[in-house]
Image (spheres, rainbow, N blue to C red):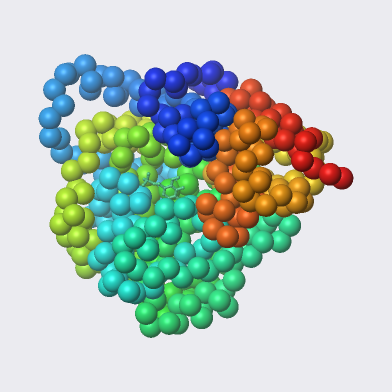
Amino acid sequence: MSYNFDEIVQREGTEAYKLELREMVFGSKDVLPLWVADMDFKAPPAVIKAMQERASHEIYGYTIRDKKFTEAIMVWLESQHQWSIKEEWIEFSPGVLPSIMVAIHEFSEPGDKVIIQTPVYPPFYSIVSENGRELVKNSLVEKEGYYTMDFDLLEKQASDPQTKIFVFSNPHNPVGRAWKKEELRRIADICIKHDVLIVSDEIHSDLCLFGNQHWVMADLFPELSDRIITCMAPSKTFNVAGLSTAYAIITDQKLKARFHKRLWAMQLHMGNLFGGIALEAAYSEGAEWLTALKKYLEGNALMVRDFIQENMPEVGFVLPEATYLLWFDFRKWGLSPSKLKKAMVEMGKIAMNDGVSFGTEGAGFQRMNIGSPKVIIKDGLERILKVRNQVYKH
Ligand SMILES: Cc1ncc(COP(=O)(O)O)c(C=O)c1O
């Protein structure tokens, strides 16, 4: 079957966050929305069909998730990641962020320290500090656009007895790394040695590109089983983020029981009817669509790379190992972060995520979402070039 990712689907009038919040975030509605991490593509046909069929029943009452839900997850993880899991390891959650929040509440006390690796997806900051925990920044190390980890610092931070949790982004948003086995090994060793719980956010794991592989940390290192919570979802993979449906996988049944109890205490267990239907259809019938999507995203990323090389070689950019989020380094333009943001919005009329929203390390960077038809990405690149022609003195 062929899928048309070039199709332009109008999202106006659908209350899309990406469109509606432009005025609030960028001060203008007249900007090309290449920011929020959802895609401008229709969901896989099987997902649409399943939801339409269920919608035609016309009663949408309280609904359970039965074996179909957990079986779809088990089959998906086995086929995509060669991860064999047991049904009892799976816990529904209405989102990956809610899963992280539940873990923070259950496995740390107010005032305890939680490590994140910055620059990182902005809610990682608020989920720690707004839930009364102390944030510990383990800055990633950047060299010519490629990011690695500072393990010495991580070890030092993990060795603090107040440090209880490490919230890990794998693959990493926004730097696009799909962490390698050896890197995961070092993290595992440090967290075991210093008794730190790993909350492994693997929401982007299905979106490895250019032959890169995702390693499921919990699968690689069974010795982590009583200290790792793996958070996953179909939301990024199949563009169904508005359906609030995710899950956590926890091997150790004592750990799982605590997570489960806390999730229920917080009344987060109900979920919504359509999310379950979408997950089952996507995981059962969406593999071919995903293969086509990844090919299209790779094409977009390569187009961006070529455009940058030809037209603005001073902009730092490396192809992402995973995710549809590109991380551009505009530091050579010599603008302050606020001037860079203003220039993109006012001169370029383009809305990308401002680098500093991911942390101080993001000063001079912008994140572009390439989950859109090629013509839109091309338009975005032309807009950036327009800015460059006005601000870059070379
Ligand atoms: C690393 C990461 N975690 C979590 C989320 C959000 O997950 P959810 O909507 O399931 O809470 C995102 C969305 O962009 C993300 O990039």
Tell me where residue 360 appears, x and y as whole percent: 58, 60
Residue closest to the eye, 74 or 131: 131
Tell me where residue 267 appears, x and y as whole percent: 17, 50
Q: In this view, does 293 lie above or below 203?
A: above
Q: On the rendered image, what quadrant is the C terminus found in?
A: top right
Q: In this view, does 220 lie to the left or right of 67?
A: right
Residue 291 shows in this picture: no
Residue found at x 26% / y 64% = 105
Tell me where residue 187 appears, x and y as whole percent: 50, 70
- Tell me how many marks there are: 0
Q: In this view, does 375 lie above or below 183?
A: above
Tell me where residue 75 appears, x and y as whole percent: 35, 43
Residue 99 falls in which quadrant of the image?
A: bottom left
Residue found at x 43% / y 57% = 124
Residue found at x 53% / y 69% = 138
Q: In this view, does 109 lie to the left or right of 181?
A: left
Q: In this view, does 106 lie above or below 281?
A: below
Residue 347 falls in which quadrant of the image?
A: top right
Q: Is residue 231 left or right of residue 375?
A: left
Residue closest to the eye, 364 or 113: 364
Q: Is residue 196 left or right of residue 360?
A: left
Residue 123 shows in this picture: yes
Q: Is residue 150 above or below residue 87?
A: below
Residue found at x 57% / y 74% = 151
